[in-house]
Amino acid sequence: MHVVHAFADSRLVSGVNQSVWQLSAAQAAMYPDSQVTVLTFDPRATAPPGVRVVLVSPHSVPAVLARLRPDVLHLHSVLRPTLTIATLAARRLGVPVVASPRGGYAPRAIARRNLLKRSYTRSVELLRMRHTQLFLALTDREGRDIRALYPDAIVRTVGNGIAPLVAAPVAGQHPPHRRPSLIYLGRPDVEHKGLDRLMRLAAELPEAEVLMYGDGLERLHRDGPVPTNVRLMGVAAGPEKAAALIGSSCYVHLSRWEAYGRSIVEAMGLSVPVAISAECDLADEVRRLGLGLVLADADDAGGSARALRRYLDSPLAEQSTRRAREWALTEATPSAVAQRIAQAYAAVIPDAAEPSDVGPSGRNSIINH
């Protein structure tokens, strides 16, 4: 089987890109006698073991697909004209198309778009989706959002794969905390990520230190005063991210909408308690399985602060954190997710659910087109 993914790049802070690279590497390990290819516009992209990376331009995508003739074209994200070009090219070639919208059809996300983008969603994007054979939703909640736009769509729910982080000492890392510490990792999008909520929560928890990691967080100073117990950090990746998470008392994520939240699951895998807003799509799973604290009204900073204090001081935090780690390391690893996606592919490729048990072939290359 030959799977082609499009279009990841090398940005470390993008959850979509991380998911594509981890999935492609896991699929290459699971299908050693087949091929996994990632199309990219980024000349800095590096091929994981067993994965072929093809550098393309928007106008070359149809020709590249015609040459590769994959068994399935797996597209990620939404509202990119090249995705439509690739979808229509695949249709002409008779190649099944699988789409992972990754939260792009959440009602709040659509409402936030300007008039041009909303029109694009209802026109060009609709055309692309009509020629998509299978949708992969990250959560059941996202699956409902997809069906609301495309009632006849075939939808399967498969979460993101999260490579377990390995903690290691990092030179220059902040010293161990002597006070409770809350941590956030992500983009500086105030409305989407609910950073205004986090600021208000910090003000209600003066006894705690709040560490915010991400690129461009310094712009928060332009939106108003930052509480004195908030520290704005830079981007943390790999061992630095693991060390930051392990050094914290709780990972807090207060998004107004969130299709998945990779850092939430990474924290779970490192036995860090998590507290998330009810608007996070993972909230249903966290509540159902008892994996952490779901804040019913994240706009109520006082109530959220009281709930968080009670939770962290109770035996429930330790119990749910233990369950969350077990869940993350069994259900959310790249290999487990690749297996479930193989079963989902079977809806359009009959033999897709029969991966080999042989290890990765070590095949990797970068090709320019």
Image (cartoon, helix red, strand yellow):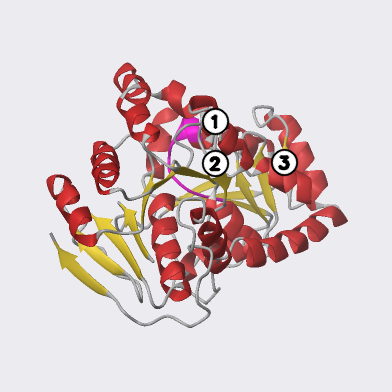
Tell me whether the residue at label 1 lies in contact with that at label 3, contact meaning CB atoms closer than 8 angstroms: no
Q: Nearer the viewer, mark 1 or mark 3?
A: 1
Residue at disc 2, secondary structure: strand
From the viewer's perspective, tell me whether residue 117 is left or right of residue 313: left
Asked if the residue under mark 2 is in contact with the one under mark 1, i.e. CB atoms within 8 Å, the reply is: yes
Mark 1 or 3 closer to N-term? Answer: 1
Image point (60%, 61%), residue name: 332
Give the labeled residue for mark 2.
155
Q: CA distance from mark 1 to mark 2?
A: 8 Å
Residue type at mark 2: give it.
Val
Question: Quadrant of residue 128 in the image?
Answer: top left
Which residue has dot 1 on it? 147
Which residue is denoted by mark 3 in the rendering?
294
Residue at disc 3, secondary structure: strand
The image quarter containing residue 80 is top left
Ranked by sequence position, the earlier of labels 1 and 2 is 1
Relative to residue 74, is residue 358 drawn left or right?
Answer: right
Q: Relative to 116, is 127 above or below?
A: below
Asked if residue 339 shows in the view, the reply is yes
Identity, as a three-letter code, of the amino acid under mark 1? Arg
Q: Identify which residue, 165 or 27, lies in the foreground.
A: 27
Mark nearer the N terminus (2 vs 3): 2
Q: Which residues are magenta?
A: 184-192
Is residue 188 located in the magenta-colored stretch of the structure? yes
In front of the other: 66 or 176: 66
Q: Position of residue 262 (x, y in %)?
A: 53, 53
| Label 1 CA crowd tier, 10 Å (few <14, some 14–19, many 20+) | some
